[in-house]
Image (tube, grey):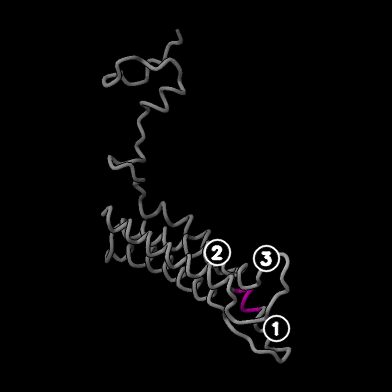
Amino acid sequence: MQRLPAALPKWKSLTCKPRSFVAYWLLCAPRPWYSEAGMINPDLKDLWTPTGVLLGFQVTLFKWRLEREAEVGDKGDIPWLVPADYVSLVGMLTFVFGVVLLPLSGLFSIKFATWAFGLGTLLFVGQALGLAGHYQLFNRSKKRQFVWFPVQEKIIVAFTICAAIFYTAVTLQQA
């Protein structure tokens, strides 16, 4: 039988001791980063690094879109922002206000910042997929149509909005 290190806590609630370190880690290891409800307990500053990374990606992608539309306008065509770009703008505002500014000012709690981070991440993914839908990259056989809001983008933006509503409802129910 394999012996466990002496530093590990005593086995109070188990009828038998786990036989390996992996079993100990899966069954009994203390996890201070989880609360009693099983949710992660981040500090506000712990959310700022991934928020900054995702916000940097969003700003870069949005800058690319603006440069592309300015180039289209210079060629005499009509430049526009597609609905996926508006999803990106809402996601960026969610990150800036919901994760950084409002919780930092003390107006909202860490739970609000955690919700805003999840929503911003969901909108970031929805925007990237929505742009792929705008350029109609999800079909292989059809020729691309040059419309403002193609069907593929409509489906992805609608799915993103439904997922955001569902995420908000589940988060509010847990609070």
Q: Earlier in the sequence, mark 1 or mark 3?
A: 1
Determine which residue is flagged by label 3. Answer: 139
Q: Nearer the viewer, mark 2 or mark 3?
A: 3
Q: Name the disc covering residue 71, or none.
A: 1
Q: CA distance from mark 1 to mark 2?
A: 22 Å
Kind of residue at disc 3: Asn
Q: Dot 3, crowdedness within 10 Å: few (<14), some or many (≥20)?
A: few
Outermost residue, bottom side: 76
Q: Is residue 68 above or below residue 76?
A: above
Magenta-highlighted residues: 63-67
Pick whichever of labels 1 and 2 is earlier in the sequence: 2
Of callouts 2 and 3, which one flags the residue occurring earlier in the amino acid sequence? 2
Q: In x, y percent, where is residue 78?
A: 65, 89
The residue depicted at 43 percent of the width and 15 percent of the height is 19
Decide which of 63, 46 is in the foreground and name it.
63
Residue lying at 58% horizontally and 74% vertically, measured from the top left = 151
